Image (tube, rainbow, N blue to C red):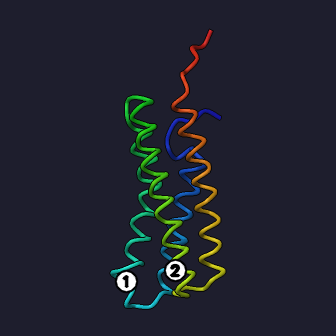
Amino acid sequence: MAIRSHRDLAVWQKGIDLACGVYALTRSMPKEETYRLSGQIIRCSTSISANIAEGNARGTRKDYAHFISIARGSAAELETFLVIINRLALAPREQAEGLLRETEEIGRMLTALRSRLAAPSIPNP
């Protein structure tokens, strides 16, 4: 299947699922975290798919790769916050660990996509 849109990318779809999971996680966190970690993890989780979409809409592979790098940074930021949430027991451990596994998978997918975008393109014969 040809990629016609960012919506066709498995990594974008997984990123959307991850962001929805993060929203669900924040509902179980203490209310005093609303403007602290909850807000941070919502922003970085939604940033992953948003940057994939924006990069895909750009005109060059270089621009696209740059936005994939930003999305990868957001995934690394989310990983860090999820570890902190687990250590402080601010949310159900199983739920946070599941999101951490999803984030790590998305990070690997973004790294692979970034590598493909950075590689020289081979013209079709």
Residue 122: percent from left, percent from top: 58, 17
Which residue is pictured at 40% across the width and 91% down the height? Answer: 31
Which residue is pictured at 59% across the width and 77% down the height? Answer: 96
Q: Quadrant of the N terminus?
A: top right
Q: Amino acid at mark 2?
A: Ile
Residue ranking furthest to the left? 35
Residue 69: percent from left, percent from top: 45, 45
Q: Which mark is residue 85?
A: 2
Residue 93: percent from left, percent from top: 63, 83
Which residue is pictured at 49% across the width and 66% down the height? Answer: 78
| Separation of marks 1 and 2 at Cα, in angstroms | 13 Å
Q: Which mark is residue 102?
A: none
Which residue is pictured at 62% across the width and 63% down the height? Answer: 102
First in sequence, mark 1 or 2: give its number. Answer: 1
Give the left or right position of residue 73, taking residue 125 as reference: left
Q: What residue is pinned by disc 1?
A: 34
Under circle 1, the secondary element is helix
Q: Tag 2: Cα neighbours inside 10 Å, few (<14), some, or many (≥20)?
A: many
Q: Amino acid at mark 1?
A: Thr
Q: Is residue 125 above or below residue 98?
A: above
Give the left or right position of residue 77, taking residue 3 as reference: left
- Of badges 1 and 2, the one in the foreground is 2
Q: Is residue 42 above or below residue 57?
A: below
Question: Relative to the observer, which residue lies in front, 80 or 61?
Answer: 80
Find out whether the residues at labels 1 and 2 contact each other: C-beta distance under 8 Å: no
Under circle 2, the secondary element is helix
Indicate the quadrant where residue 98 lies.
Answer: bottom right
Q: Is residue 80 above or below residue 111?
A: below
Residue 120: percent from left, percent from top: 54, 22
